[in-house]
Image (spheres, rainbow, N blue to C red):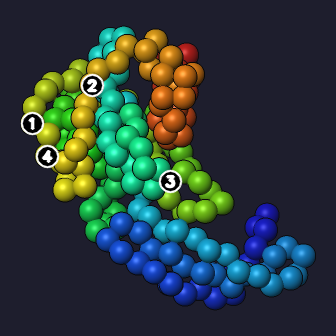
């Protein structure tokens, strides 16, 4: 059952990474209103796993004014749409220099469904080999490091890793391993 009907839509802002639209809506009770939506292309998040170690990237997140550790993740440039598995391979190589002989999709995440249409596919990358990264301009200050899984969990519990997508993806990894 749909809760709202879209009566009209207009783009109110756009740049190379996102657009914002304002929709005129009719709610389930018949009343009219507006809804603001941030549209971004779907992203891929990759969990690089080597035995008991996971590979993370750290970068400055401008909206927070903080550097954050997270799994490699991103969208195609210029709001382009790209197949999720191709995007996962691209993001892993671009941000870490790693390539994977095995890349398996293990989950789907909705970033903030009350705010944005963006969704993400989670991939598990194993049998890794190292190479050169090819970071975008905005990623030039990015650092990468290997963490044990227990160190990752400790950093999450201490509030040092706060990226919701990375934490949710790790939970999907745990469930994927239980099913296997």
**3 or 2: mark nearer the eye:** 2
Residue matched to label 1: 132
Residue 145 locus on image (x, y percent): 27, 25
Say whether disc 3 or disc 2 marks the residue closer to the N-terminus: 3
Asked if disc 1 and disc 4 are in contact, CB closer than 8 Å, the reply is yes
Label at residue 134: 4
When the figure is inspected, residue 72 is found, relative to residue 74, above or below; the finding is: above
**Element type where label 2 sits in the image:** strand
Mark 1 vs mark 2, CA separation in Å: 14 Å
Q: Residues within 10 Å of mark 4 (few under 14, many from 20)?
A: some
Where's the N terminus, which quadrant? bottom right
Q: Which residue is mark 3?
A: 119
Q: Nearer the viewer, mark 4 or mark 3?
A: 4
- The crowd level at tag 3 (other Cα within 10 Å; few <14, some 14-19, many 20+) is some
Residue 172 x %, y %: 53, 29
Residue, x 14% and y 40% (percent of image)? 133
Q: Is residue 90 visible?
A: no
Whether residue 38 is situated above or below residue 136 in the rendered picture: below
Label 1 crowd bin: few (<14), some (14–19), many (20+), radius 10 Å = few
Callout 4 touching callout 3 (CB < 8 Å): no
**Quarter-of-image position of residue 59:** top left
**Label 4's element?**
loop
Q: Which mark is drawn over residue 145?
A: 2
Q: Along the polypeptide, which appears first: circle 4 or circle 3?
A: 3
Q: CA distance from mark 3 to mark 2?
A: 26 Å
């Amino acid at each position: 059952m749909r809760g709202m009907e879209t009566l009209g839509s207009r783009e109110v802002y756009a740049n190379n990474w996102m657009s914002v639209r304002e929709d005129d809506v009719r709610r389930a009770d018949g009343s009219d209103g507006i809804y603001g939506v941030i549209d971004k292309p779907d992203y891929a998040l990759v969990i690089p796993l080597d035995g008991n170690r996971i590979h993370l990237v750290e970068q400055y997140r401008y909206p927070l004014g903080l550097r954050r550790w997270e799994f490699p993740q991103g969208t195609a440039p210029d709001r382009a749409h790209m197949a999720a598995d191709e995007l996962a391979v691209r993001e892993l190589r671009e941000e870490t220099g790693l390539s994977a002989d095995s890349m398996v999709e293990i989950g789907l995440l909705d970033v903030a469904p009350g705010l944005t249409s963006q969704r993400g596919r989670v991939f598990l990358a194993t049998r890794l080999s190292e190479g050169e990264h090819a970071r975008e301009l905005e990623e030039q200050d990015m650092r990468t490091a290997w963490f044990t899984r227990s160190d990752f969990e400790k950093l999450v519990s201490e509030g040092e890793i706060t990226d919701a997508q990375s934490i949710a993806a790790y939970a999907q990894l745990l469930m994927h391993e239980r099913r296997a």
